[in-house]
Image: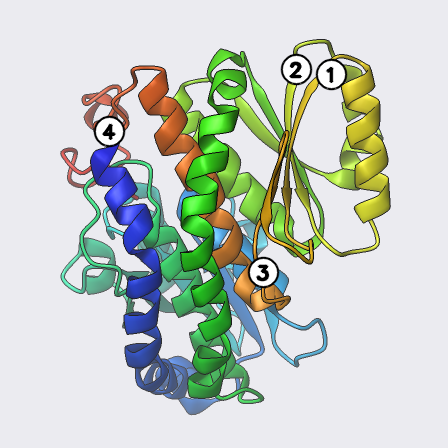
């Protein structure tokens, strides 16, 4: 069970290193070609599912005063962003390039005269073929529905392309700066598997899962919630810490299961207070600590090795959720390497190729 998914998860550090060697030149070329050489004032990233969370993760990494605005939207809710405003470029993101809603958005945007660039892992995909330009996501094939290496490599591609576009950062230097995060992620893998074994009983019995994070970690928690939902077949949701504190407390119940993503930010002490409160109310609290000086396991808590850079956080954190998904789904007898409902994509026409289970 989940053997293929696990092999993709464990291959990620090697995939990232290879991509980091190849991408800077491609990022420069794409950035130079976007918007006909004119300054890009706004980038709108469009995707669904895991691609959407990859877009959101990228937006959280961009400095607020960089001179270019970055927005993230799902393809069916572009609203006023559909206008082809001068200096605006649309990045449409779909790992397989088969998402019908993303391709429909691309077609609608181009009819309005917008500049559209596709980010896919298949240069021959329908989305890549209908865009003004294409940037390859070099993650290789991933023949499972719950995407892993495709998500993390998408974030890497978006980040390096954004750095090239902004001009203030050199993609090759940024790629080299991520090497410590890739190394940390590789070292975290066996620790994550051990922790997943410890958490299996709690997660396998959970009727629903609630993830809580703050700042740039929130999109990572959202992607983590999607992975757990896709593989454990239970409702899973992600909350920003402050939002949870203003209403979410009403779902604190005995037997509830929470996963907390702890960072070094100003909300850490408040998060620790919330963990103690939830535990005192009979909830099960599992913590992923990204700011501990020493990696290791304690009951209910995994301290992962992190390099301390926000740009490196996706590679250090997302494999934790991915491994939890693979290990616990196997314990539940769920074959997450295959779709639960093979006819779903054709019935809802969410993929141009209904036999493709990816995004």
**Is label 4 or label 1 in front?**
1
Residues marked 4 and 2 touching at CB (< 8 Å) = no
Which structural element holds mark 2? loop
Q: How crowded is mark 4: few (under 14 residues within 10 Å), some or many (20 or more)?
A: some
Quadrant location of the N terminus in the rendered image:
top left
Which structural element holds mark 1? helix
Distance Cα–Cα, label 4 vs label 3: 38 Å
Give the x, y percent position of residue 210: 62, 26
Residues marked 4 and 3 touching at CB (< 8 Å) = no
Distance Cα–Cα, label 4 vs label 2: 32 Å
Give the x, y percent position of residue 148: 35, 46
Camera-side residue: 252 or 324? 324
Q: Name the residue under label 4.
A: 345
**Is label 1 or label 3 in front?**
3
Distance Cα–Cα, label 1 vs label 3: 31 Å
Earlier-in-chain disc, 4 versus 3 = 3
Q: Name the residue under label 3.
A: 306
- The vertical placement of 296 against 338, above or below, is below
Earlier-in-chain disc, 2 versus 3 = 2
Residues marked 1 and 3 touching at CB (< 8 Å) = no
Give the x, y percent position of residue 66: 66, 79
Q: Name the residue under label 2.
A: 256
């Amino acid at each position: 069970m989940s053997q293929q998914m696990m092999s993709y998860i464990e291959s990620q550090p090697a995939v990232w290193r290879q991509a980091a060697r190849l991408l800077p030149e491609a990022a420069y070329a794409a950035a130079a070609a976007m918007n006909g050489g004119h300054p890009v004032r706004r980038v709108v990233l469009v995707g669904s599912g895991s691609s959407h969370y990859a877009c959101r993760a990228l937006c959280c990494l961009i400095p607020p005063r960089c001179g270019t605005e970055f927005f993230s939207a799902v393809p069916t809710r572009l609203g006023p962003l559909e206008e082809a405003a001068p200096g605006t470029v649309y990045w449409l993101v779909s790992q397989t390039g088969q998402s019908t809603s993303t391709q429909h958005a691309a077609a609608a945007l181009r009819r309005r005269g917008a500049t559209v660039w596709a980010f896919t892992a298949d240069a021959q995909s329908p989305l890549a073929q209908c865009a003004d330009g294409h940037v390859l996501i070099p993650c290789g094939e991933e023949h499972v529905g719950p995407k892993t290496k495709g998500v993390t490599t998408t974030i890497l591609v978006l980040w390096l392309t954004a750095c090239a576009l902004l001009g203030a950062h050199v993609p090759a230097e940024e790629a080299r700066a991520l090497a410590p995060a890739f190394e940390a992620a590789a070292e975290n893998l066996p620790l994550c598997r051990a922790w997943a074994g410890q958490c299996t009983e709690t997660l396998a019995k959970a009727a629903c899962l609630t993830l809580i994070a703050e700042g740039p970690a929130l999109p990572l928690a959202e992607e983590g919630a999607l992975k757990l939902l896709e593989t454990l077949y239970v409702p899973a949701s992600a909350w920003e810490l402050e939002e949870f504190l203003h209403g979410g407390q009403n779902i604190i119940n005995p037997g509830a299961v929470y996963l907390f993503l702890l960072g070094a930010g100003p909300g850490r002490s408040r998060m620790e207070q919330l963990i103690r409160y939830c535990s005192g109310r009979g909830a099960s609290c599992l913590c992923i600590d990204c700011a501990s000086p020493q990696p290791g396991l304690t009951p209910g808590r995994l301290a992962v090795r992190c390099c301390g850079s926000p740009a490196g956080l996706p590679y250090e954190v997302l494999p934790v959720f991915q491994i939890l998904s693979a290990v616990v789904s196997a314990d539940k007898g769920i074959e997450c390497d295959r779709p639960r409902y093979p006819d779903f994509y054709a019935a809802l026409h969410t993929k141009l190729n209904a036999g493709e289970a990816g995004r």
